[in-house]
Image: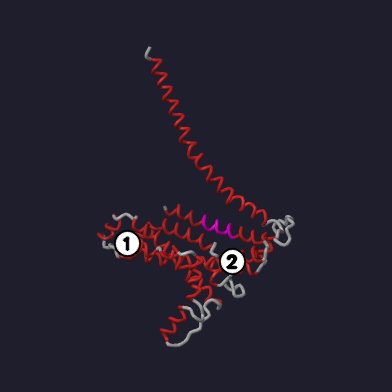
């Protein structure tokens, strides 16, 4: 007589568990569906449509669509301005990421040793990140103005001679001016990530190294550096993606000119697609840049996994 109620109770329990299991599996998926639909509508459809346009001859003036295959990509790689903009973008990314990393690592090491006022220093360090890139572009455009710029006025105050240096017009100086603006804006990000990594390192290996009489350089070379590699690769990957699509600062400071001397990939994309109304060629250039950025990011995140 007592077996049936027990079996019935056990069956109810098992059924409740299976229902709870199904609910725990399907509920997160159901909650994620609206977000995926929004991403598909806002991001996925424009990307697919842009990919389709890259295989056509569509322009704003001539709206007749005809498939041309890989002709846009062939034209792109035969364009000397694209080759120069691509090489300049790669050089810009390499210099900016590495200089930001070196500055960020040094500042992060110093901030990690501060006992009092760390919160205030972190807040102060994050101020450049709070500025919009367009505002940073206007700010540094005034700094490097050849007539009333702050840099030339500082040189006049130090030397007593009027220096009219065309920072934003000269070939190497315009590139250097943009690089300085981007480093000023991006270094705080490196500092925050690397300082978080330094503060999360275990204390025991460093105490053992002190007992063994290791120097500061030896502790940094054999302990801090290897354990900090996941943070380094992560910070460099994120900043590389930011720098691969840099547009605002360059557009405000130089506009890619004069005569394409400071042209980067995305300023040239804008010039082709929105100024020249050649949407098909601009879409092809965008996808070449996205593909290269994807490969670079894949390489960095592969190293992140290996370093762990």
Magenta stretch bounds: 289-298
Q: Which residue is mark 2?
A: 267
Any mark on residue 118, and which?
A: 1
Residue 67 placement (x, y as % from top left): 73, 55
As measured in the structure, the alpha-carbon distance from the residue carrying label 1 to the one carrying label 2 is 39 Å
Quarter of the rendering occupied by the N terminus: top left
Q: Work out which residue is located at the far top of the displayed protein and give it.
A: 1
Dots 1, 2 in contact, CB < 8 A: no
Residue 253 placement (x, y as % from top left): 53, 72
Residue 38 placement (x, y as % from top left): 55, 47
Q: Nearer the viewer, residue 117 or 94?
A: 117
Q: Quadrant of residue 272?
A: bottom right
Any mark on residue 230, and which?
A: none
Residue at (44% x, 59% y) in the render: 235
Residue 295 placement (x, y as % from top left): 55, 57
Q: Nearer the viewer, residue 22 or 77?
A: 22
Helix, strand or loop at label 2? It is helix
Residue at (31% x, 65% y) in the render: 216
Q: Is residue 294 left or right of residue 19?
A: right
Q: Nearer the viewer, residue 62 or 6?
A: 62
Asked if residue 248 is positioned above or below residue 27 in the image, the reply reads: below
Helix, strand or loop at label 1? It is helix
Q: Is residue 227 magenta?
A: no
Q: Nearer the viewer, residue 294 or 244?
A: 244
Q: Quadrant of residue 270?
A: bottom right
- Report the predominant secondary structure element of the magenta stretch: helix
Q: Earlier in the sequence, mark 1 or mark 2?
A: 1
Residue at (46% x, 78% y) in the render: 151
Asked if residue 246 is positioned above or below residue 306 in the image, the reply reads: below
Q: How many marks?
A: 2
Q: Work out which residue is located at the far left of the displayed protein and give it.
A: 211
Asked if residue 14 is positioned above or below residue 236 in the image, the reply reads: above
């Amino acid at each position: 007589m007592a077996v049936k109620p027990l079996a019935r109770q056990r069956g109810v329990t098992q059924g409740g568990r299976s229902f709870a299991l199904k609910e725990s599996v399907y509920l997160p998926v159901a909650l994620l569906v609206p977000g995926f639909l929004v991403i598909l509508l806002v991001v996925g459809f424009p990307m697919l449509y842009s990919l389709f346009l890259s295989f056509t001859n569509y322009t704003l003036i001539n709206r007749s669509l005809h498939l041309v295959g890989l002709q846009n990509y062939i034209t792109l790689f035969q364009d000397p301005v694209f080759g120069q903009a691509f090489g300049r973008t790669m050089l810009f990314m390499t210099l900016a990421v590495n200089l930001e990393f070196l500055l960020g690592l040094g500042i992060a090491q110093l901030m990690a040793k501060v006992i009092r006022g760390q919160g205030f220093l972190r807040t102060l360090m994050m101020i450049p990140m709070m500025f919009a890139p367009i505002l940073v572009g206007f700010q540094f455009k005034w700094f490097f103005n050849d007539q009333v710029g702050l840099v030339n006025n500082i040189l006049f105050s130090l030397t007593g001679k009027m220096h009219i240096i065309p920072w934003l017009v000269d070939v190497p100086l315009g590139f250097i001016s943009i690089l300085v603006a981007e480093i000023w804006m991006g270094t705080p990000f490196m500092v925050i990530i690397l300082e978080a990594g330094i503060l999360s390192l275990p204390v025991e290996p460093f105490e053992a190294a002190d007992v063994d009489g290791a120097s500061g350089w030896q502790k940094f070379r054999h302990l801090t550096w290897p354990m900090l590699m996941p943070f380094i690769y992560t910070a460099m990957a994120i900043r590389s993606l930011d720098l691969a699509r840099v547009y605002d600062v360059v557009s405000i400071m130089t506009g890619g000119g004069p005569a394409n001397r400071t042209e980067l990939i995305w300023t040239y994309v804008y010039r082709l697609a929105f100024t020249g109304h050649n949407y098909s060629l601009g879409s092809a250039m965008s996808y070449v840049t996205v593909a290269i950025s994807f490969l670079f990011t894949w390489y960095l995140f592969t190293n992140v996994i290996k370093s762990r």
